[in-house]
Image (cartoon, rainbow, N blue to C red):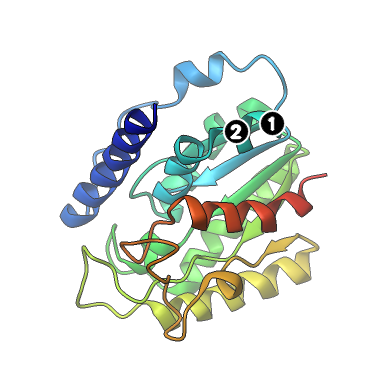
């Protein structure tokens, strides 16, 4: 079983990295369409994001099962990609909460250059759609990253810090909970330490355990 889980996680990371290396992705059409139809019980929360969220239920399935959570991450996605599928992968499922973890692939310029203000605008739009559909948004800090393996010329650490401050300020002004993973997971360079994520971007199981301990208090 452990080998199967490891292979699945490696596949998720490989798909994400391959997409990132090309800077533009070909996303499987309606990836979660069938899975969404099979959801019969209203989830407590949909965890919505990119490869970090994509791998989470594979790495730590019990956290999702025990707490009635659903993962809807797609590797390599930017906030713009996520906004486009928000209706079908979040609103359709009618969760109490949507936990939004997004922005690192924008900073990595997966879909080309984008301002931090535009990234925030996309996140705000997701929150507005959620609230219009009586779903409570929860915003998460972007995880620390000192380097991106697929864009090694970039130095994202300080941009991530700046974006997180913008997300935090918006969340506070809008009365939205803000989950601060970054301060609990960063090293002295504002990167993700190797013991929490060997590639410096994606958490390992120990990293996800820290995230779970932080997040669970927001899910009532």
* Numbered tag placed on residue 66 in the rendering: 1
Q: Nearer the viewer, residue 39 or 210?
A: 210
Choose top left, top right, bottom left or bottom right for residue 46.
top right
Judged from the image, the secondary structure of the residue bearing numbered disc 1 is: helix
Residue 25 position, x and y percent, is: 24, 45
Q: In this view, does 72 lie above or below 116?
A: above
The quarter of the displayed image where residue 154 is located: bottom left
Q: Foreground residue, 205 or 23?
A: 205
Q: Is mark 2 on a helix, strand or loop?
A: helix
Report the side of 43 relative to 203 (left or right): right
> Tag on residue 62?
2
**Quadrant location of the C terminus in the rendered image:** top right
Is the N terminus in the top left, top right, bottom left or bottom right quadrant? top left
Q: In this view, does 35 lie to the left or right of 75?
A: right
**Residue at point 32% right, 32% down?**
3
Name the spot of residue 205 as percent of width and height, x first.
47, 50
Crowding around mark 1 (Cα neighbors within 10 Å: few <14, some 14 to 19, many 20+) is few
Label pair 1/2, CB-CB below 8 angstroms? yes
Which circle marks residue 31 in the picture?
none
**Residue 53 position in % (x across, y down):** 48, 46
Q: Is residue 159 above or below residue 72?
A: below
Q: Viewed as shown, does residue 141 lie left or right of 8?
A: right
In the foreground, 68 or 32: 68
Residue that appears at 63% across and 48% down: 99
Binning the other alpha carbons within 10 Å of mark 2 as few (below 14), some (14 to 19) or many (20 upward) gives few
Q: Is residue 207 at least partly visible in the picture?
A: yes
Rounded to the nearest angstrom, the CA distance separating label 1 from label 2 is: 6 Å
């Amino acid at each position: 079983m452990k080998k199967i889980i490891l292979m699945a996680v490696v596949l998720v990371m490989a798909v994400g990295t391959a997409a990132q290396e090309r800077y533009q992705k070909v996303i499987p059409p309606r990836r979660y369409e069938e899975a969404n139809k099979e959801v019969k019980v209203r989830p407590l929360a949909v965890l919505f994001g990119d490869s970090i969220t994509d791998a989470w239920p594979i790495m730590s399935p019990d956290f999702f099962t025990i707490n009635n959570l659903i993962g809807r991450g797609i590797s390599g996605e930017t906030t713009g990609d996520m906004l486009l599928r928000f209706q079908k992968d979040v609103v359709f499922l009618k969760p109490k909460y949507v936990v939004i973890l997004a922005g690192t692939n924008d900073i990595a310029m997966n879909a080309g250059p984008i301002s931090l203000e535009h990234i925030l605008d996309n996140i705000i739009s997701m929150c507005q759609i959620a609230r219009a559909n009586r779903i409570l948004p929860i915003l998460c800090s972007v995880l620390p990253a000192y380097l991106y393996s697929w864009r090694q010329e970039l130095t994202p650490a300080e941009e991530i810090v700046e974006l997180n401050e913008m997300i935090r300020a918006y969340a506070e002004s809008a009365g939205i909970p803000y989950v601060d993973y970054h301060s609990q997971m960063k090293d002295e360079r504002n990167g993700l330490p190797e013991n929490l994520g060997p590639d410096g971007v994606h958490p390992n199981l120990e990293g996800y355990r820290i995230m779970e301990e932080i997040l669970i208090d927001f899910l009532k």
